[in-house]
Each structure stands twice: as structure tokens, then as C-alpha cells.
Amino acid sequence: MAKPKVRIYHAVDESGDSYRRLEKAGAEAIWEGGRWDAHIKGARPEDLILDADTVAVAGVANRTLRINDQSFASAPDLRLVAYYSNGYDNVDLDLATQQGILVTHSPTESNWGGVAEGTFAAILCLLKKLREKDRTVKAGGWRDPSLFGTYLGSRLSDSYGGITIGIIGLGRIGSRIADLFAPWRVTLVGYDPHVEDAKFVHHNVRSVDLETLLTKSDVITLHCDLNEETRNIISTGAIDKMKPGAVVVNAARGPCVDTDALVDALLQDKIAGAALDAMTQEPPDPQSPLLGLEDKVLLSPHMVSANRGGGLVPAIPWVEEAVLAALRGTVPNYVVNSEALPLWQERFGGKPLI
């Protein structure tokens, strides 16, 4: 019997040890060394999972190459698409579910906690004007009123009320953001129609509707999934509701923000600034107006969660275990399309390949 194929895109495990363990278990592990994208540049969707029984992939890194109907057609025996990342928006999830293919993700704390910490740092960088102060001193300048930052927390001494931070999406990342800002005595408001009130209470976040969040917040930070509800949730109409001094932060998915609307708002000083770890086009076109906004926008190459010893590395055993489970005919952990389970059980349950 031929060995089951495991295709690995974005080889997170640079040592290759987990891939060799898959081979020792009886699978054929296929991966490429070097840069994560070296093997997918110019590739077609049908190349991505050709003849594979399982696929290991990172959604953020490979979002430019969709796992779609052409991909699935090239691998009729595919059981699993396993993500090293928390996100999985480059796979056609509905089609995978229809075909009884499981999709798993890896919500490791190093990933989502890293996003929260990076977002926290970006907000402080913008509000405290750290880049501007650094550049001024290095250029021979010194104190100037244009370098004044924003005081975040409330003060008893002069009744200053502090700023309001609006969190769109109170999942793992949004909740951690709330916890990080809790000691700062800021006002926290949040919008997430999919979260129970008890979670808002637990993290000291006041649940509000989207319009209230947009109109009341000094900082608006996005930590939501990308779907039809959240696509362009920050639009021209949304920006028009914001305070003139508001700051927008997107550490979720690029299409959650209408880039053209954001650029226009920044150029017209409708809002004060933005920080983007996620952009609609990644990397941005060299001619993108985002690159010419100077200190009005803080850009990050969609790696705000990447830290030494963290990032996607802790997900290596998660993906390895998911792949082994699927190849053994058992249901892996962290399945995101549980609706596929009945058909998956019918097709693959109790039918081991290793």
C-alpha cells in the first residue's frame, strides 16, 4: 500500500523533526526548505494539495494562494487541512465541509497572545508619538509641542477622564487586549454580537453597539474574524462617525478595513492615525498610498505575533498531532468546521492509513 501523502506549506518546523516523525509513523511528508513562499510562487491552486491525504499550512502566509475547488479536485482523498496559524481564511471552508474534509487551526497562546501584545505596543507607539520623538532627537532637534503624546488613564488630580478604547471582537485576542489595558484606568468598550454578556463583564468591557463604539472611542482596534459581516467594517461611513482624533488599529484581517477609505480619511485629517499589521494587499504595492503617509500610519508586515520562541512555533506539535489523528481515522482537535464531521466519519472514520 502506498504511503499517505502529507504536503506541508510554510515549513514552520525549520528543523524538520516533526516531518521526520510523520515519516517514521508511515506517511510521506513533502516539504520545501528555504523561504516559506519559495515553493508557492507561481503555483496554481491545484498544485497546492496535489494527491495529498492531509495538508499542513499557515493561513496568513499563504493567503494569496487559495485552497479552493481546483485544489480539492486534485486531491480526492484529502482528509484534513491543518493550520499552524489561528487564521484559516485562505481555504474554502464551505466547500471543505460539503466534501467532508476537516479543517483545523492552532489557537496557541504564543500566537493570539503575541497579537495582543503587539497591538498594545502599536497603540502606545502611536499615542505617545515614540517614532516622532526618536526621529527629532536623531535629527538634532529637541522638545516641541508637536511631540506631545496622549495621556491614557483617568486622573483624580484634575478630573481628566482618560481615553476610551473600543475593541471590535472580544475573542482571545480582544479579551487579552482588555486585560493588558485594565491597569491603565482607561474606559473599555467592545462590540461582539457573538459573545455572551458574562465575558464582557469578566474583562471589564462595556458591551455597546457598533455605532456607539465608533462614535465614543479614541482608539478602535480590530480583532474579529473575516466574514461578510466584518468585511469593510471600517468603511467611509464608519470613519465618518469617529472622533477627529481617533486612531484605528487592524491586527485582524486586511479586508476588515476599506483601505481607500482609510487613506482618504488620514489625508484629510478626519482621524489622527492608524496602525496596520494586516492589509488588503500583502505585501503592499510599492506605489500604495499607505507607504506615503509617514507618521500617520504605523505598518507591520503581518507578523505582530512573531516573537522569538513564539509565533507559530508552538503550533508544530498541534499540527503534527492533528495530521496523525486524521491519518489514523480519528477526529483531531481544534476542528473549525464541525459540520463536516458526519460525512468525514462516513468517509474516513475508523479507516487508518498508518
Image (cartoon, rainbow, N blue to C red):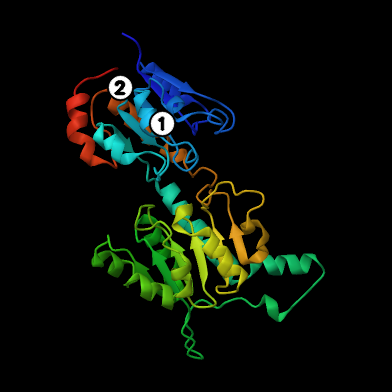
Q: Which amino acid, mark 2?
A: Asp
**SS state under label 2:** loop
Q: State the mark number for residue 214.
A: none
Q: Is residue 205 above or below residue 176?
A: below
- Residue 74: % across, % down: 38, 23
In the image, 227 versus 202, the foreground residue is 227
Residue appearing at x 32%, y 36% in the figure: 103
Residue holding disc 1: 56
How would you rate the neighbour count of disc 2 (Cα within 10 Å): few for under 14, some for 14-19, many for 20 or more? Answer: some
Residue 39 lies in quadrant: top right
Q: Could you tell me how far apart the alpha carbons at marks 2 and 1 are, in whole angstroms?
A: 15 Å
* Quarter of the figure that contains the N terminus: top left
Would residue 326 appear left or right of 146 to someone viewing this image?
left
The residue carrying pointer 1 sits among few (fewer than 14), some (14 to 19) or many (20 or more) residues within 10 Å by Cα, namely many
Q: How many marks?
A: 2
Q: Nearer the viewer, residue 251 or 235?
A: 235
The residue closer to the viewer here, 302 or 73, is 73
**Amino acid under label 1?**
Ala
Tell whether label 1 touches label 2 (CB within 8 Å): no
Mark toward the start of the polypeptide (2 vs 1): 1
Q: Nearer the viewer, mark 2 or mark 1?
A: 2
Residue 57 is situated, as x and y percent measured from the top left of the image, at: 43, 34
Rendering coords of residue 171 (x, y %): 34, 57
Q: Quadrant of residue 335?
A: top left
Local secondary structure at mark 1:
strand
Horizontal side of residue 61 vs 25, given as left or right: right
Task: Choose between 78 and 12: the one closer to the eye.
Answer: 78
Q: Kindly identify which residue carries mark 2.
A: 77
